[in-house]
Image (spheres, rainbow, N blue to C red):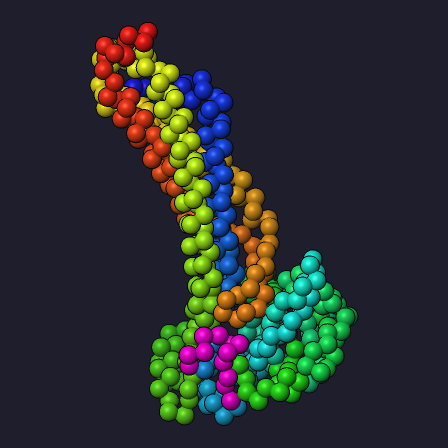
Amino acid sequence: MAVPFSYSLRNLWTRRLTTILTVSGMALVVFVFATILMLAEGLQKTLVETGSYDNVVVIRKGSGSEVMSGVDRQQASVVEVQPEVAVGPDGRRMLVKELVVLIALPKRDSGQKSNVVLRGIMEASPVLRPQVKLVAGRLPRMGTTEVMAGMGIVRGFRGVGLGETLCCGLRNWRIVGLFDAGTTGFNSEIWGDADQFMQAFRRPVYSSVLFKLRESSEFDAMKARIETDPRLTLEARRETRYYLDQSEAMAKFLRILGLSLTIIFSLGAVIGAMITMYSAVANRTAEIGTLRALGFQRRSILLAFLVESLLLGFLGGAVGLFFASFMQFVSVSTMNFQTFAELAFSFTLSPAIAVEAMLFSLGMGFVGGVLPAFQAARLNIVDALRAV
């Protein structure tokens, strides 16, 4: 015979103060656990959404990112004539050769300088990246010192507003446009003419070659040809894969940090739950004896107390997730470990994170309640009834 579920609920309600305190402790741990996972998820989502599946990024072998890559003009020309490169409606190949350099700009809130990506583009670059939308001003004219800035940079740094002048590379660059790239990494970049940047920053080579595939299924054949061509020292990746690789180191670091912090915090929450349940057993000794006398078996008593503890974990998880969900309205910026540049992104709550957080909270409830539950189940009927 099983103890009714309502029995566990009524006991939690009877001990409202201790229930609230225990749930609050668990909720705090779940909040920390969920927000750090949301931070890592937001970073990965931002970088993965930056790329397009049918776009291919070609960089120097072993370079890891565009910042460390170098593709000379001869090698870029070889890539340009690959048969898999798509041709646009105007008859031109949908391929661009880009340059990436880092400059230091003062942050809007603290005034401290941080690295920002300056991307040298070609005329077709915005076409290959449809997620980039012009929201103010106009596109920079090729062959001039005009640039446009992403909204993530405009919100986070000084001196990059529409009409302002940026001084770097011994030149003055006038900001003639602002663009919004949504939640992608491009939102944290400044774009201008690639050839002008190469001259200003004395860079004789491009950082990467980007092109759209004629057919998505042709990627493997194209990749093999480029990477085995003796004239080239290049590697090709789908743009989505390239940006996913960019996020892995930082996301892994955040998850390890989150796990370490939550393990430390969870010890306190588990101890709190254990104290609460031991107190419940001590205060209900006679009640437990009465239940045993009425015919409830030891396993029923054990299950009833475990259910109470799991309910504490469930409530703590639900409350912690509720408050963590509001972090989705917060944007943060941090340094990308791969590019050493500032990257703005938002917390992202996914179904997987919600499930992980709830399982973690239920685990705390189980660990905190299992020993008190065994103690309650082991109570002798006669000794328990003497407490009446």
Lateral position of residue 373 relative to residue 68, left or right: left
In this rendering, the answer to whether 358 lies above or below 64 is above
Lateral position of residue 158 relative to residue 42, left or right: right
Q: Nearer the viewer, residue 36 or 180?
A: 36
In this rendering, the answer to whether 263 lies above or below 374 is below
Q: Does the magenta stretch include residue 363?
A: no
The residue furthest right is 163
Give the residues drawn in magenta, as a range: 61-72
The residue shown at (42%, 81%) is 61
In this rendering, the answer to whether 308 lies above or below 217 is above
From the image, which quarter does the N terminus lie in? top left
Image coordinates for residue 330, horizontal then vertical, percent: 60, 50
Residue 140 appears anywhere in the view: no
- Which quarter of the picture shows residue 102? bottom right
Image coordinates for residue 156, horizontal then vertical, percent: 66, 61
Q: Nearer the viewer, residue 143 or 26?
A: 26
- Which quarter of the picture shows residue 268? top left
Image coordinates for residue 167, horizontal then vertical, percent: 73, 76
From the image, which quarter does the C terminus lie in? top left
Image coordinates for residue 13, horizontal then vertical, percent: 45, 20
- Which quarter of the picture shows residue 290? top left
In this rendering, the answer to whether 78 lies above or below 383 is below
